Image (cartoon, rainbow, N blue to C red):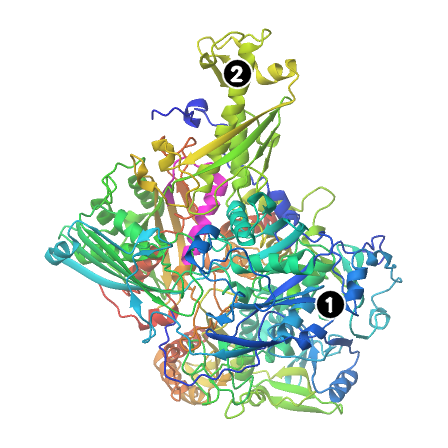
Amino acid sequence: MRKTRRRNIKITISLAHYFTTDKMNNFSYTQAATAKEATGIRKDKADAAYIAGGTTLLDLMKAHLEEHSQLVDINALPFRGIEQTKDGLRIGAMERMSDVGENALVLQQYPAVSESLLLAASPQLRNMASIGGNMLQRTRCGYFRDAAFPCNKRVPGSGCPAIAGDNHNLAILGTSDACIATAYPGDLSVALAAFDAVLTLENAKGKQRRVPVTEFYLLPGKTPQKETVLEPGELIVAVTIPAAPHAQRSTYLKVRERSSYAYALASAAVGLDVQAGTIRSARVALGGVGAQPWRSSEAEKVLTGAPATEATFRAAAAAALRGAQPYKENAFKVELAQNTLVQALLKVAG
Amino acid sequence: MDTAEPSFFETNPKAGSVGQPLSRVDGRDKVTGKARYSAEYNSLPGLVHAVLKTSDVAKGRITGFDTSAALKQPGVLAILTHQNLPKLAKTPNDPEGKKAIGAPMGFLPLTSDQIHYAGQPVAVVVADTLERAQYAAALVRVQVTAEKPLASYEDPQAKLFDPEKVQDGKTPGHTVRGNPQAAFAAAPVQLTHKYDHAINHHNPMEPGSTTAHWEAADRLTVYESTQGVTRTQKALSTMLGLAAEQVRVVTKYIGGGFGCKGSTWPHTILTVQAAKAVGRPVKLALTRQQQFTSMGHREDQTQTLKVGASKDGKLLALIHEKTSTTSLWDNYAEPNSRIINLLYACPAFESSYQLARANVMTSTFTRAPGEAPGSFAIECSMDDLAYQLGIDPLEIRLRNHADKDPTNGKPWSSKSLKQCYARGAELFGWSKRNPKNGQTRDGRLLVGWGMATASYPVHNNQGTARVRLYADGHALVQTGATDLGTGTYTVMTQVAADSLWLTPDKVRFELGDTKLPTAPNSGGSVAAGTVSSSIYMAAQEVWQKLIKLAVKDPKSPLYRAQVAEVMVDNGRLMLKANKSKGEDFAALMKRNEMADVEGNGNGKYGAGYESGLAPGPASSGHQDDQAGHSMHSFGAHFCEVKVDPELGTVRVTRWVSVHAAGRILNAKTARSQIIGGSIFGIGAALMEATSRDPNYARYTNASLADYHIPVNADIPAMTVEFIDEHDPYINAMGVKGIGEISMVGVSAAVANAVFHATGKRVRSLPITPDKILAAKEVQV
Amino acid sequence: MSEDFPTDFAAPSSGSAPQDGTRRSFMKQAGGLLGLALAPPLLSQAERLTAFSKTVEGVTTLQLKVNGTVRSLQAEPRVSLLDALREYLDLTGTKKGCDHGQCGACTVLVDGRRINSCLSLAVMNQGKEITTIEGLMKGEELHPMQEAFLKHDGFQCGYCTPGQIMSGVACVKEGHATTDDQCREWMSGNLCRCGAYPNIVAAVREVAGKA
């Protein structure tokens, strides 16, 4: 049982009680045929939103966590395909999790990416959810998810009851006094962050820019409501993952409270290039423990050039969690994340 | 047994369809989507939708509503609050009203401006479509003066008290047998341990739902997701001030209940009132989040169990204390002590309950109420005792086997627990168990075996049924029971078929309607035994009527025989002394131009059957001690787990359950029910916990993504067997229930297997990875 | 399935179609007014984007091809596919267990793939082939997956069952039921509170073995 002791904290209760029941406002719906058309609508209407699979957006709207006056269906946009490019494997943002997870090229070149997809959600949700949408999932923090609670991420300045409350599934790395959520609760971005994936974004002017996944997510700081560098109206076009030996020899290990269909308590995406027992290059990212997908250069530093032994892996895990700031109920994540990382490294070291 | 009433054992010494693994007779409707549940009566004329608006805060007072924005929404028909809802004839807000209604909670929302728990309904919004009702509800602004709530007995501000009785007066707050304190103090072996149990929610897949249709100003039909139509009828008619017959309740299909649909909760009467207000049929389905604050839960609780034993492992004293959270109005606690008092031979026993009031709704019976968490405490402690003394866990249970009921000294009506142990151990391979813990590995994983005893009472109850046999050889059988998925439709078809010597396809069985004869709630494992006996007795009346007809029919070979000299076998009426003299019922009926003959039967279950006392419409458990025998099902669970010592994850990898529960009516559905209860228990053991914020007294994980119930991948292949048991004392069919016992002992079997695997004794449910990582190893 | 258009354009029997306008107008018109709905024009997949109005606002006529038949309904864009099926088309075989993609009771096939219909908008599914539990039977003959669920008792209360069966059909077709363990994992998107999992695995595996 998650037992949390009462603390003497001030409780802020808003008088405008919004929360009630699953519901959605009466938005209008538009099918966009081109990116230009889609971004054009968003430009004119700040509170419009894009919809692809709908699995994140409609969930949030029903729970009254987001409200939009217009939904722009971007499924017809040509952000499709999984193809080899000179920069690596390029995956269209509108591809579905299930198709990418079982794609032969992904399986061969980036096992961790495939595993992160196939260990996520359920077969039905994976059939629906787009790659771009997956990356824009929002936290499972119970205080964010229930509009009856204060939450700095939802209502900036309203407070963070998770700090003195139920925080067993929240973050221990990269948090702030304003927010301790694992803002991205999913799996894919953890693997993408590990393997230096780069996003292609497109704005209303049709201009594209490239942003590494590691720079895509923002730490909460004083503005936990701002979760990514995505500008209003900007679309995720594709994600490109560079080819590398450490990506080919990779895995994604996920620890959950049940065997499937659950978010991670802790997870690790790791890749190693081992030659003659020595680690030439390493990639490490953690999920479920960071305020955002947590790439650990500290762990990678320990691993690179070291022998591929359990001792090395444990040292790397210790380095990865060195800055951890646990709370009352999630202190176990320090040990769990280290063990998860060690097990993942042992597996790829084989 | 010498009973005046006929019994199935005598009339049908060789069962026909009964016991066979018949596929569910309602199965075709369920696999084709034709089965209609309570929110699916869409063809009612002018049907509209209601949704609840619920309170954000757990304590406070409503100072006003702003409904202007909501009322502007198209399609909105009504917004009902405590300010404009007509008064009910009776509410459960006073003890007399609560009792008259049979309400699970001594408080009805929307009867005042008070807010007592988070998620309490504060308004009902009705609109022409679901979407519009939902959105309008969101736009209703509620002005609240909020106060700081109490969240649980763990709050330092909470005041613990010793209730005189718990569980609505059914269980004494304090029980003493023998001299437990002295016996414990003198015991050579003493164990004292605390056991925590998280809040659990039933979470049936179908959320609570109601469709209310006022067919006239004083005539109401309610399609309700309930475990008992009669109890719902009583509750609604009492609250509305109507006669029972003015309220019809229909439940043809119900998407699971597990206890939470055993009572009539506020949303049901609110839907009925909403339908009255708008003058149209109204349906309301709880959202999943609302399900967590609308139909009760298993309360958060801590048990302390002291075990005194001799050096050879014989129990000398058991002292049990339970502390738990209850609501502001009710003294509800699951009766954990019942099984601890009963399970083993022990000369001294004491139990006491402590409660603390908090801003929560009243908790309620959750599958195996009391027995499930109670067995966790006693069965883990028995395991500890076994390890401490170096005795095999199964052996220590045999040494403490209760040959008679230790609580009252009565003999058991039947008890086949030793056979359950033996068969379970054989199927599981228990004899190959490594006596040391933490020793067995499968690669990185630690492997452990655990077992536990299960038991559940035969709760006194009764019901009625109607059987109509047609001359052409088919039958209509009716009773107001419900089928929660337990198999009622199917097993009752089989019982009727055998009682009438027809094949099951010739029996049409109807249930789930207050227009039919009265049956008990499906709960407390009483339905199978009570309803089957009712049907059997109704069939006996059919045969008696036909025998009386035959002996008066000059054309019958039985003309002028004494009624008592005639028997029936295989549908043929014949002289007991000369079986060649007789005739088939169809011939008799056709000759007399009788299209059909009808019989009504009253089936008694448990103490009332043996004692011959009319049990009355007693609630479950009442008058259990009236019989000469003590009546219980027994069983044993055996479990293998694999534990990842680094990641703290536990997987159940093998499962064996063997139960003895009297006559098994259908081998297929009974097996499914045992599997289902075991999985329910595995959920409680490993993953289920509703988290209530200590400051806001509001749940933080009220969803099926964050409140984990087991998924397919959590569950291995399972082996289930039953021990044949012939029990003539319990009812005319010799049936005990299996719905609850399937879950009893499960969490202990899992926890014991985890201890065997890891040497870590986790006494706090659920056993999640954080607890495995935190626990210390104890090598024994 | 052919692109042929439907003979069935019956009104939803629930009479729950909304009206844009006052309450009074709804009250007056409730019941039967959709019987007048006309058959939509013949469309090809390619024409879909342009044929359906690009921006949909308020109550409009939506067309959903369900179990081979195009059905019309009057609904707002916020209506989920699940609610469209259950509340507007009276196809109540598809169940609502959580409305948030967390239980799988609402599983249907869209263009042959299993999805959670609660997290999809009806308006987004126009022109697609939607298959629900009501569409599995051939005449009076049960689909092999339905037969297998009956035989193996792959359900108790029956509420998750349509979703389980639709998921099972897809699971076999995907090739994800080749071993018991694989089947367990790929059927884990459908919760069953009665705990019929071992029997569900038996049913799905049996059908997979015959496929």
Magenta highlight range: B658-682
- Residue A132 placement: quadrant: bottom right
- Give the secondary structure at mark 1: loop
- Give the secondary structure at mark 2: helix
What residue type is disc 1 on? Gly
Q: Position of residue B554 (x, y in %)?
A: 58, 6
What residue type is disc 2 on? Ile
Q: Position of residue A271 (x, y in %)?
A: 49, 80
Q: Which mark is residue C159?
A: none
Q: Position of residue B502 (x, y in %)?
A: 57, 26
In the displayed structure image, the side of residue A172 where residue B543 appears, left or right = right
Q: Chain of mark 2?
A: B
Q: Which residue position is annotated with label 2?
A: B547
For the residue pair B238 and A216, the one nearer the viewer reads as: B238
For the residue pair B373 and C211, the one nearer the viewer reads as: B373
Residue B676 sits inside the magenta stretch: yes
Q: Residues within 10 Å of mark 2 (few under 14, many from 20)?
A: many
Residue shown at the point (43%, 49%) measured from the top left: B718
Q: Nearer the viewer, mark 1 or mark 2?
A: 1
In the displayed structure image, the side of residue A289 where residue B388 appears, left or right = left
Residue C184 sits inside the magenta stretch: no
Q: Main secondary structure of the magenta part?
A: helix
Q: Which quadrant is the N terminus of chain B positioned in?
A: top left
Q: Which residue position is annotated with label 1?
A: B75
Q: Which quadrant is the C terminus of chain B positioned in?
A: bottom left
